[in-house]
Image (cartoon, rainbow, N blue to C red):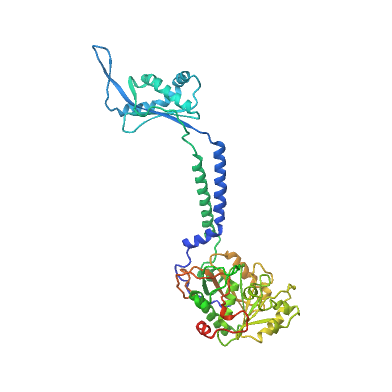
Amino acid sequence: MNTNTTQPSSGNDFPTLLDFWKSFKKVWWVSAIAAVILGIAAFIIGAVTYTPMYRASVRFTIMPLVDSDSSSGASVYSFNYNEALSTQMAATFPHIINEGFLSEIVSYDIGRPINGTISANAITDTNIFEMHVQSSSAKDAYDIVNSLIENYPKIAEHVVGDTRMNVLVGSEPILPTKPYNSGAYYSTVVLSVFVGIIIGLGVALVRMYTEKTVTGKRDIETEFNGKLLCEIPHVVAKRTNGSNHSLLKPITEISGFSESVRALKARVRSAAESEGLKVIGITSALGNEGKTTISYNLARSLSHGAEKVLLVDMDLEIRAIQEQLNRKGTVPDTGITEVVSGKLALAESINSISDTFDVLFAGTENAKFSKARFAEVFRLLREQYDYIIVDMPSCVTSPESVSIADFCDGIIFTVKYNSTDRRKVSHSINYLAFSDTSIIGYVINDVPINRSKSGGYKHPGRYSYRHGYGYSSRYGYGYGHGQNPDSAAKDKE
């Protein structure tokens, strides 16, 4: 295995808001479920336990006795501002209530037990004193506060001295018509939903730092002691003709993508020449990491020269290449499985896309995997082609991946950016170590445009791509008509 490395690029391996967003998109359902569960629970609890409460209030101004008229004996009250007296009355009010004497008077006055909570406070920097009654009955609240207006000054006189309490105009108590806490539990529901969202964000944050996905060159070099061949940019999906798959625009129209593929082609060709590689397998730890897209585009790019190139679909469970390249059913879906089962000759199973580019489908047979029979087919193919690109199954999901790796001279390992846990990649690498071949390098796929550096592109735009294979209508569906000369010239290095 080639282990030459270069210094990792600075500033490209630390978590960013984009990394967090990608992590959150994978666990967004945690926020959704937590928000729904907590919101519903808060609503049910609030609706079951909700008790409508009514409030009646009154405001007084406090005026102390200053002197007496000696001739008449009448009390004289000062109308001067007296903040201290108001504050003193508010401070002593709880004691008066707790003593029970005032409560007994009020209860006797209204003719029933007190159903409510009584409180009082002084308005700061004024001589205004407030009393409030809260009750589950609007009438109780109203009756209690009116009784307090009548009886409280008599009790307060024994505590703070002779005072006069004048009800402020406009603050007279009125019979409440609706609960003051109407719908109060809705705020709890909103808070619960918000907490659910926060839980999801927390899970995403923990996942970003603990799951340790591959995000750059440093990860390849330090975690796997490998060589990064290139990074493939993230591009946006477009569905066509109602298909579940999308077809790439011609790679000449996606400059960032095509530059990455050409960079990969140059490095693969260099490794092939220096190490004598002819059969190159492309795999990944899990599915949906882009290995088939890379397999097709690498094979296609290598064929833009004098070398004759074959793409072999050995992902016998998925068989995605024939699904994509034979969507119109213009050629048989037969392939390598028919050859190894003896139902078809090798020459009859190969489909020609251009003069230098052929494809061997996986086929339709479900025959038991026989390493010896597949090895014989690959021996014959080596005699006919300069390069053979093998779309292998993913390592974690297929027990045959090691056997298929033995057919190859080298392996390119594909990792989707910030997606697969490094532990799964390490497990796959250790599994491939049982084969007779080695990993020549790694490709990081689906890299955000503003982060990728190794591919040589710096495009701010968005591309039209996903799960497709990059071929265009210029190749035709007949697989024998060849490539448009003008477009071929554009796509060559």
Q: What residue is drawn where x is 57% and y is 37%?
A: 48
| Residue farthest to the front, as pictured | 241
Image position of 148 (left or right of 405): left
Choose between 4 and 251: the one closer to the eye. 251
The image shows residue 8, relative to residue 130, as above or below, that is below
Measured as percent of width and height from the top left, residue 300 is found at: 57, 80
Residue 131, by quadrant, is: top left
The image shows residue 3, relative to residue 122, as above or below, that is below
The image shows residue 44, relative to residue 113, as above or below, that is below
Measured as percent of width and height from the top left, residue 267 is found at: 53, 80
| Residue farthest to the bottom, as pictured | 306
Choose between 429 and 391: the one closer to the eye. 391
Measured as percent of width and height from the top left, residue 318 is found at: 66, 70
Asked whether residue 15 is in view, the answer is no
Q: What residue is drawn where x is 48% and y is 66%?
A: 13
| Residue farthest to the right, as pictured | 342
The image shows residue 67, relative to residue 183, as above or below, that is above
Measured as percent of width and height from the top left, residue 384 is found at: 65, 86
